Image (spheres, grey):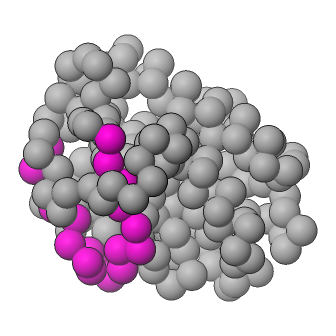
Amino acid sequence: MRLQAIAALVIACVGSVQAQTAGNPAPSVHPGTRLSFPPNLGGATLEQSLSDGGSSAYLYSMNKMQIFVHIADFGRRVPSGSDSPALMSQFTGELNDVAAKMKSAGFGQLERPAVPSACTYGSVTFRCIVYSVNSTGGRIYGKLLMTGYHDSFVKIRIDWRAANGSTQADADQALQSFVSALMH
């Protein structure tokens, strides 16, 4: 993947956490959720982590795919699971934020289903949606997942490109390994 495309994807994922925390690594164990982020997790390699108070972001890579995890409570207690009104509202906001940041980064033709679905990885059910954008190197695909976990929002996003030989089945397999290792 081109360096500019990776940078745009990371900016679209990390957003304000990245802007506020240049150089502050996130803890290897998130204090609120107790989720552990070692150098290697479910076959993925940790590339970068950032932290700002209670908000932490982790970027992993696996087989030419990027996996991003963002944990935050946004100043409120978050119910567990993927179907609370608070989670549905935050998920919609996150998806709209990704769309706006992709557009401002010069990517065109964001395509996504009108309604998100539920998907399960390991023993955790997430609100999820698959979307894609055009880039000069071909379509970039992403899958956004979110759930409430130990009073926090846990957002996971995976990005892949068909030009690299990756498919949605590859992304789902990577997520199954990664999420199972993360949230065991």
Quadrant position of residue 100 = top right
Quadrant position of residue 33 = top left
Q: Residue at x 67, y 49 (%)?
A: 131
- Examine the rendered structure and indicate whether residue 78 appears above or below residue 67: above
Taking depth in this image into account, of 20 and 154 the one nearest to the observer is 20
| Residue 137 lies within the magenta run | no
Give the position of the C terminus as an image quadrant: bottom left
Residue bounds of the magenta highlight: 33-52
Task: Where is residue 97? Give x, y as percent.
Answer: 62, 33
Q: Residue at x 65, y 67 (%)?
A: 6
Quadrant position of residue 178 = bottom left
Give the position of the N terminus as an image quadrant: bottom right
Taking depth in this image into account, of 109 and 17 the one nearest to the observer is 17
Q: Residue at x 63, y 57 (%)?
A: 9
Task: Where is residue 155? Give x, y as percent.
Answer: 39, 44
Taking depth in this image into account, of 38 and 67 the one nearest to the observer is 38
- Examine the rendered structure and indicate whether residue 173 appears above or below residue 57: below
Please indicate whether residue 143 sits to the left or right of residue 156 in the image. Answer: right
Task: Where is residue 177? Give x, y as percent.
Answer: 31, 72
Q: Residue at x 26, y 17 (%)?
A: 76
Q: Is residue 35 visible?
A: no
- Examine the rendered structure and indicate whether residue 3 appears above or below residue 156: below
- Examine the rendered structure and indicate whether residue 66 appears above or below residue 91: below
